[in-house]
């Protein structure tokens, strides 16, 4: 029988970005809050101290900050006819582990969606007609607008310490910024980061072709900064250890640097690590949650934690799994199209062009996670869906993130993978290569979803979650369109060698190479409970005291990195909780 703990007002599952935001916001209401984190405790000191954290083998290759598949995984298949098998070795995506979650090891890219992306179904029908939407595409609007979310995007950017250049200030287009972004009420909290040589070359080439380059926005401090919680950031020193690493310099916006040290000082907030939540417990009528049951890895016991309010703030995949095993929402069935929990899983569509120059030196060891220049001339609100034959878009960028010797040795195609010829190629080309990348949208489809695996169980006897996902023709056409545009830019730069990598028609999803950790959907937000799990306030339709944060709320994936929208939605939900729900707990719609 599970051990029972004293009741709390709020229990938070997961202590990454959204768990930290919700903890801070609700702690200010005087509520007694407990956060449960499945992984270890982590902090800038001592966990990210220099030089320990700058260990490429430990963190960049062996994924020390990531979840271990032996402890937590899912099964994956590409089609309904395949048998799903467990994801046994991290590759395609890298969920974080421990306090801070993926906010510890991310690169910091922080975007707002375009206003059109928040109402993509309506925008598509109004501009191009309903007939262009493929029959199997689950294209939806968000149940709230960019304009409603703008103050919350702004707040997250100022808490997370984003460096960037505004392109649209209250409707006025600002030179040097992104002219295609939605209007913002004020500029970024810090100016854009200085640019590396490859970014300058790309910007010159893009501008010469009539495009509109601007610096990539990101949670990397370009100067000293203090946020609203009194948390301090120091200017980045371009060490090149952002992606897959914690930041030792207090320069990368993360839950630790921006929120957690302030939150931990709150006497009504506590957190417990090595505590893996197994399910959300429901009342007899299944209309409210009574708390959560978790496994305490330190004592080897199951523990029931009663609470009046349950906030699921774990990674998107884990949130969806908890909803499925807890029976919250009706599980999605691709055969009938009925049910919402697990519906609409989507990923991200990327491609790239590599260029090698004998006469240019790029100093790749000088870099940051969010360095670079971008063009948004082929973003969603700039594409003619009917003429191009796809729904979606992509930003195109370049920038130096690192020059790490194991993972960052780009070489021309055909170079031997070892031996004398490999060594000679490294000597010839290290520091003489750059790339242009496409980061594009990915729509949701009827046969791409998450459910409970009928065969495999986890170490607690629960069914593992099963992912069914494959690339679709619409998104392949989008990435091939970007290939043409990117190769045009690359050729204008006159490299000695140029090679492209884009998914082609018929490409099948491959879990082995890393792509992004931008998994979305599965508990989409919406107005209709038949097609969504949570409402516009991220509140479960059928269990009013359960709120679900994170990118599972996305009905399809953005062309951008998801964290900016995730953070904005968290502050939006926190505002609704603080100003409305706590006064009278109920369904907010």
Image (cartoon, grey):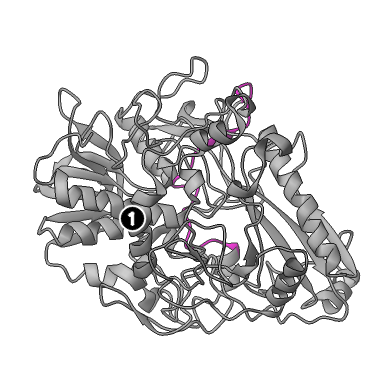
Identify which residue, 118 or 387, lies in the foreground. 387
Residue 447 location, x and y as percent? 57, 26
Q: Is residue 29 left or right of residue 518?
A: left
Residue at image position (12%, 49%) is 9
Q: Quadrant of residue 99?
A: bottom left
Identify which residue, 575 or 405, lies in the foreground. 575
The residue singled out by tag 1 in the image is: 18
Residue 449 location, x and y as percent? 51, 31
Please indicate, yes or no, whether residue 305 appears anywhere in the rendered image.
no
Please indicate, yes or no, whether residue 402 appears anywhere in the rendered image.
yes
Identify which residue, 563 or 201, lies in the foreground. 201
| Magenta stretch, overall SS | loop
Residue 446 location, x and y as percent? 55, 25
Which part of the image, by quadrant, shows the C terminus?
top left
Which part of the image, by quadrant, shows the N terminus?
top left
Residue 433: in magenta span: no
Residue at image position (74%, 73%) is 204
């Amino acid at each position: 029988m599970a051990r029972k703990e004293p009741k709390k007002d709020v229990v938070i599952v997961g202590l990454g970005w959204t768990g930290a935001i919700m903890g801070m916001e609700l702690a200010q209401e005087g509520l007694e809050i407990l956060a449960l984190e499945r992984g270890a405790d982590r902090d800038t000191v001592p966990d990210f101290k220099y030089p320990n954290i700058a260990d490429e083998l430990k963190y960049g290759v062996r994924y020390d900050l990531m979840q271990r598949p032996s402890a937590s995984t899912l099964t994956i298949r590409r089609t309904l006819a395949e048998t799903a098998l467990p994801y046994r070795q991290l590759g395609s995506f890298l969920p974080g582990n421990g306090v801070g979650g993926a906010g510890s090891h991310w690169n910091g890219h922080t975007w707002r969606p375009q206003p059109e992306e928040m109402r993509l179904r309506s925008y598509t029908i109004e501009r191009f007609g309903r007939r262009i939407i493929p029959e199997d595409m689950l294209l939806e609007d968000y149940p709230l607008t960019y304009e409603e979310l703008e103050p919350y995007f702004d707040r997250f950017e100022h808490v997370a310490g984003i460096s960037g250049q505004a392109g649209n200030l209250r409707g006025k287009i600002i030179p040097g910024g992104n002219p295609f972004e939605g209007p913002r009420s004020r500029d970024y909290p810090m100016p854009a980061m200085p640019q590396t040589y490859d970014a300058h070359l790309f910007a010159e080439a893009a501008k010469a072709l009539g495009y509109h380059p601007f610096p990539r926005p990101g949670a990397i401090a370009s100067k000293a900064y203090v946020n609203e919680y009194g948390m301090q950031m120091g200017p980045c020193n371009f060490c090149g250890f952002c992606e897959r690493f914690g930041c030792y310099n207090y320069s990368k916006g993360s839950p630790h640097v921006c929120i957690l040290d302030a939150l931990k000082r709150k006497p009504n907030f506590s957190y417990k690590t090595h505590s893996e939540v197994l399910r959300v417990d429901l009342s007899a009528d299944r209309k409210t949650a009574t708390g959560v049951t978790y496994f305490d890895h330190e004592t080897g016991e199951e523990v029931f934690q009663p609470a009046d309010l349950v906030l699921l703030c774990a990674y998107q995949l884990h949130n969806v799994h908890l909803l499925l095993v807890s029976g919250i929402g009706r599980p999605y069935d691709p055969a009938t199209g009925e049910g919402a929990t697990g519906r609409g899983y989507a990923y991200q569509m990327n491609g790239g062009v590599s260029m090698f120059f004998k006469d240019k030196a790029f100093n790749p060891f000088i870099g940051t996670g969010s360095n670079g220049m971008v063009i948004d001339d082929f973003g969603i609100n700039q594409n003619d869906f009917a003429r191009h034959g796809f729904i979606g878009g992509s930003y195109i960028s370049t920038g130096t993130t690192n020059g790490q010797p194991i993972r960052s040795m780009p070489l021309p195609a055909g170079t031997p993978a070892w031996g004398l010829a490999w060594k000679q190629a490294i000597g010839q080309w290290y520091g003489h290569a750059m790339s242009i990348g496409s980061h594009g949208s990915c729509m949701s489809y009827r046969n791409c979803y998450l459910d409970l695996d009928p065969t495999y169980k986890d170490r607690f006897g629960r069914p593992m979650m099963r992912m069914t996902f494959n690339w679709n023709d619409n998104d392949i056409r989008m990435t091939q369109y970007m290939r043409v545009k990117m190769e045009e830019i690359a050729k204008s730069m006159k490299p000695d060698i140029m090679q492209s990598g884009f998914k082609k028609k018929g490409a099948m999803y491959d879990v082995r190479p890393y792509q992004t950790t931008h998994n979305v959907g599965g508990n989409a937000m919406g107005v209709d409970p038949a097609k969504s799990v949570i409402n516009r306030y991220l509140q479960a339709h059928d269990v009013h005291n359960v709120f679900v944060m994170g990118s599972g709320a996305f009905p399809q994936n953005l062309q951008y990195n998801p964290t900016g929208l995730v953070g904005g939605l968290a502050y939006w939900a926190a505002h609704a909780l603080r100003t409305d729900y706590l006064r009278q707990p109920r369904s907010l719609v």
